[in-house]
Structure formats: C-alpha cells, structure tokens
Image (cartoon, coloured by chain):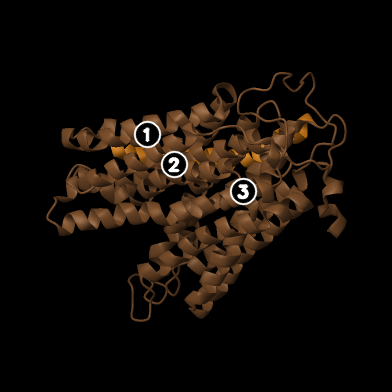
Chain colours: A orange, B brown
Amino acid sequence: MKGRLVALWSLVGIPLLWGVMKTLQNAMKLFQ
Amino acid sequence: MTASFLDRQHTVAPPGFNRFLVPPAALAVHLSIGQAYAFSTFNLPLTKLIGITAAAPGDWDLKQVGWIFSLAIVFLGSSAAVFGRWVERVGPRKSMFASALCFGGGFLVSAVGIHLHQLWVIYLGYGVLGGCGLGIGYISPVSTLIKWFPDRPGMATGMAIMGFGGGALIAAPLSVLLMAHFKTATSNGVLETFVTMGVIYFMFMMIGVYAVRVPAADWKPTGWTAAAQPKPLVTSAHVAVDMAWRTPQFRLLWVVLCMNVTAGIGVLGQASPMIQEIFTGHVTPAAAAGFVGLLSLFNMVGRFFWASTSDYIGRRNTYMIFFALGIVLYASVPTLGHMGSIPLFVVAFCIILSMYGGGFATIPAYLRDMFGTYQVGAIHGRLLTAWSVAGVLGPVLINYIRQYQIDNGVPKAQAYSVTMYIMCGMLLLGFICNFAMRAVNEKYFYRGSTQS
C-alpha cells in the first residue's frame, strides 16, 4: 500500500513541481 | 475494460484502504482539466495556421479564437449543473472516465478542426465537448473526497481543486515546448500539439479513473467521531439537490461565489497589460508574463491554504476574510500604482489571487456544512453556474470600464482605478451575503435513505 501511495503521489507531484519551477523561473524576470 | 469496472459498487474500498490514495486520483483529473486556464497559449498560433509566421488572408482573428475558451467555460458551468446528479448516481470512476473521454476527445476533434481549418469544429471540440469534460471532471471527485475526509473536508477538496489551478502551470510550458518541437516550415505545430495533449491528458486522467475509490457506507476515519455538539452553521442533516437550490442559503452562496470569482477573474485575464500600463516603461512584456505566472501560482497555493484553514476557522469566517481583506487590497491598488511601488503592487495581487483560488476550493466544504454530504457534488455543480456568469462579468467590467476611461481622456496608468473601486463594491455585496448566512431550515431536510 505504501509503494502505491508513493507511486501515485509521484505521478501527480512531479509534473506539478516541474510546472511550479518553470513558473518561478519566469516570475524572476519581474524582479530583474 | 468492462462496464462493471466503472460502476460505483466496484469502486468501494476494501477495509484498511489508505484514504490518502484518493487525493492523487482527484489531482490527476484536476491537473489535466486545469489546462483550460492556459488555453491562451494557443490563441496567437491559432491565428497563424495559414501564414505560419504571421497572420495571412483567411486566418482567424483573435476575437474569433477567443470564443473557444469562453465556450469551454460556459459549458463547464452548464455541464456541471446538468450532469451533477448523474455524477452522484454513477460515482466518481464512471464520471472521471466520461470526463477523460470528453476532454481528451475535445482536443482530438479540435485537431480535426485545425486540419480542415474549420473554426466551428474547434468550438464544438474544445468548447462544447471539452467544456463538458471540464464540468464533469471538476465535480466528479468532490463528494468522494468529502466522504473520505469528514474530519478535514476543506483540506481534502482544497487538495483536488488546487490541481485545477496547478494545471495551468504545467500546461503553459508544456504547450510551448510541444509547439516548438512540432514546428516545421509548413506547420506551426498546433495540430500535432493538440493531438499529443489529447492523448497525454486522456492517459493521465485514466490514472485517476483506476485509483479512485469510494468509502464503504459505514466507514469512518480511525478514532474519529462526529461532534456530539454540532458547530454553528455545520449541519448533520442532508438536503437533496432539488430542494437545496430553492433555499435562501443556496442563493446567498451563489452570490458569494459569483462576487469572489468576478473580482479575481477580471484581473487574471488582464494582468499582463494592466501591470504594463500602470507602471509604464518599468515593466517589460517578459516581466509581465512573469507576473501572470506568479498570480497563477498564488491562485493554486491559495486553494490549498485557504480551504485547509477553513477547517479550523470555519467557512463563513474564511469568506469574511476574503471579502474584507479583498476590499482593503483593491482599494489600495490605485495608491500603490501612484506610488510606483511594483513589489507592493505584486504582493497585493498575489494575495487577491490566493483568495480567488481559495474561494473556489472552500465552496464545496461550505456546501457540505450547509446541505450535508448526500448530494453535495450535484449541488456544487449547480452552484458553478455562478462561475460561468462571473467568467463573463469580470473581464467585461475590467475591459469595458478601462476602455471607457481611456476614451474619455483618462491616462492609461489611471484607467484601472474606477474598476478597482467597483470591485470593492462587488466584494462588499459578497460580504453582506456571507454575513447573512444562517443554518438551513429543517423543512428542507431530506428524510429518505442517503445510502447510494
């Protein structure tokens, strides 16, 4: 059950973190 | 895949099932349909399908293309209202599957429209079919999550609805990457991107279809018991959807949601030109795009933060904060603009957008508090018509009043001041409606069996 929990959260979490990272990279331009 | 796999009775969780497996299932759907917030990435490329690098005769214009998103939002609200009861009856797995078919299918039909260069096919594909996928997908995990987390309904629905905000953060860079990858001398890559995204999103949503489970009828979290003394404005009774929407509470909540969304959605749509015009010469288009991204991020984070907070301070108090703080922040924006303070201006709008997202994410738990869990998904679906109205009202208010001001000789940098004060008025109306909220009268309570 724990493995499934980690796998599922990773499947949705990794794309979300990628999106957040890309957004923050763009947002930095606002303060440059 | 057999039909029975999709049926509600086959999704009942076995004893010992970990309830934290359900939020990622909901997130898989909401992160996908949240792509809608990033649809504007396709607007310009869709106006250059013939000319490739620049618009050519026969290419569609921005106004025509803009209707695709508007149609999708209208069908989001209407399908959530129309199919809400069906979603409650068939359960989350079948409704998520229907949503995946509509949303993924909407992209594929639109790709056919691009291939044939027929705009009405795209209206039908992404606007109507995709819009139905948005509406069904948006409400499908809500009541399931509320049943899994009776101790933290705000946090649970906040987690899922956070995905709708987060979907844009993934879709915007993904669309740009895919279009760049598929671009050739004879195509700007939009058609191929639509096909790819249709397939990717269908598969991603299927993760949710496979993973979602409903709790057994008698299931409760270990060690949790319902409060013997119910909190104020939290009912232990149930109200059916057909009765709920006749109550004054439903109408008040409709106005509360509509006012909160109107205030935020207008800003979200005009954020880039607004910051560039208020701080003329100090904010580049690239920096303005960064500002839009930051607002989207706070829109997402606010969904989880405020909905979780509402579990502790109560739903009505949470909305009181949204409206009171919103009024203060909107009223201060013109002053911040005159002061030329970009950081304070950005902070003010980040908080405003966090409350915009928070309003969406807290409303399912508010509905559960007022009407019980019996048909909360269907009631939520009907309430989302407020979103459709706000989706038109917010941008129209911002755009038309700005234009009216400019036409009457007001400098561009000051053209938003009146709009901000009008937003304050709308938030005041929301505040009054929220303040007037009382418990639902017993005459509306559902007396039959609530076991599905």
Indicate which disc, 1 or 3, sits on the residue closer to the N terminus.
3
**Residue B316's x, y, as percent?**
52, 30
Q: Mark 3 packing: few (<14 Cα in 10 Å), some, or many (20+)?
A: some
Q: Measuring 75% from the left and 42% from the top, which residue is drawn there?
A: B446
Q: Mark 1 packing: few (<14 Cα in 10 Å), some, or many (20+)?
A: many
**Residue B418's x, y, as percent?**
23, 45
**Marks 1, 3: nearer the viewer:** 3
Badges 3 and 2, same chain: yes
Secondary element at tag 1 = helix
Identify the image quadrant of residue B341: top left
Amino acid type assigned to the residue bearing label 1 in the image: Gly
In the figure, is residue B207 to the left or right of B36? right
Q: Give the answer, above or below, for where B63 lies relative to B251.
A: below
Q: Give the answer, above or below, for where B217 lies relative to B452.
A: above
In the figure, is residue B172 to the left or right of B16? left
Which residue position is annotated with label 1? B326
Asked if disc 1 and disc 2 are in contact, CB closer than 8 Å, the reply is: yes
Amino acid type assigned to the residue bearing label 2 in the image: Asn
Q: Which chain carries label 3?
A: B
**Residue B117's x, y, as percent?**
48, 78
Looking at the image, which is closer to me, B295 or B241?
B241
Which residue position is annotated with label 2? B260
Q: Measuring 33% from the left and 51% from the top, which residue is drawn there?
A: B270
Number of numbered callouts drawn = 3
Amino acid type assigned to the residue bearing label 3 in the image: Trp
Indicate which disc, 1 or 2, sits on the residue closer to the N terminus.
2
Looking at the image, which is closer to me, B11 or B423?
B423
Q: Mark 1 lies on which chain?
A: B
Q: In which quarter of the image is the C terminus of chain B?
A: top right
Indicate which disc, 3 or 2, sits on the residue closer to the N terminus.
3
Q: Alpha-carbon distance for marks 1 and 2? A: 9 Å
Residue B245, numbered circle: 3
